[in-house]
Amino acid sequence: MSANGTKILLVSEREPEMPDLISALSDGGLHAVDLVRAAEADAQRFLSDGRYDAMLVSLFSSDATAFDTIARLRDHAPDVPIVALSAEEDDAVAVRALKAGAQECIGGDRTNGAMLVRAIRYAIERHQLQMALRAMALVDDLTGLYNRRGFQTLARQHMKMADRMRKRVSHIFVDLDGLKEINDMLGHREGDLALIETADLLKETFRETDIIARIGGDEFVVLALETVGLAQEHWVTRLQENLTRRNERPERRYRLSLSMGIAYYDPDFPCPLDDLLDRADALMYEQKRTKRPSSPGGTPALPTRYSASGARGVAPRAD
């Protein structure tokens, strides 16, 4: 809850609920509250347009559609905790609401201010704890990027979005060249710094909306939803420019070198995420094998190749 008060979205078809809930929240000690009502059909738009601390979702039936609403809202705004408001005190309804994604479920008298405010506060605190634990499980400790589990979780969501939007997705596999030599010659601390610098380089190159992950010791992967005017050559060129700029710094003790392979997810030819990663990985190793020992990392692209699944793949070539 912010210092400016608590903003709550009430998802309900009944506008008369508003005065009773506002009064109950005030009686329960939540005085600085901004309660906004939206019908179910408009709720997702409200969530996209504004920032809410919590949602109250009125359940006027116990059929499956009521719980589907909670699940849809949870998927659309996973960072906003949900408190379900049931017309009756029914443990079975409460369990179904919690399974659908609600943090709390209040049955019966929703005008009990103390109970309502306590449920909202518990929902927010529990949700924040869950999000923190989830972040710990999905983030790489060293670089702050997503780890393999985090990447796979978010990548599958992005591929579903690509299917709906009919957009391609670039899967870019990046390998830090010579990590073993850096560790052997300069120490593992320097090797860790090379990994951190590679992560910073990828964050500098790609957009905040792209998914960037470290999925192995020296292996990174980027998922980028394609937009008009941003072909794969854009990413290769931009990564090369940023890499060259870093390697030109006079204080460097070694040149940072990267190998890269790119595979595409095409919604017209769907294929599993693991197949795309394997394809991009193979193209990355193809580039690594063609590099000369003195070659800098990252260069223009080889001619396009096609995988058996219909996913396109390219491997930047070494100079």
Image (spheres, helix red, strand yellow):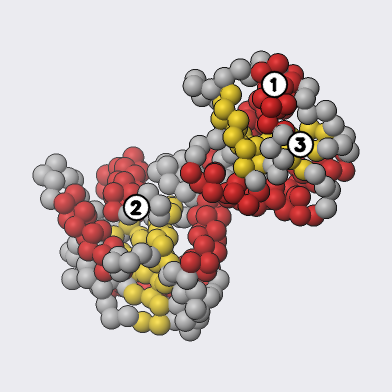
> Could you tell me which quadrant the C terminus lies in?
bottom left
Q: Residue at x 59, y 49 (%)?
A: 42
Q: Which residue is mark 1?
A: 23
Please tell me the numbered disc located at residue 85: 3
Which quadrant of the figure has residue 181? bottom left
**214 on left or right of 18:** left
Label 3 to label 1: alpha-carbon separation: 16 Å
Q: The residue under label 1 is which amino acid type?
A: Ser
Of circles 3 and 1, which is in front? 1
For residue 103, above or below residue 285: above
Residue 249 image point, x, y percent:
13, 46
Element at label 1: helix
Residue 43 image point, x, y percent:
60, 46
Q: Residues within 10 Å of mark 1 (few under 14, many from 20)?
A: some
Viewer-proximal residue among 134 and 317: 134
Marks 3 and 2, the one that precedes in the sequence? 3
Q: Are marks 3 and 1 in contact (CB under 8 Å)?
A: no
Element at label 3: strand
Of circles 3 and 2, which is in front? 3
**166 on left or right of 179:** right
Residue 266 image point, x, y percent:
46, 74
Q: Which residue is mark 2?
A: 207
Marks 2 and 1, the one that precedes in the sequence? 1
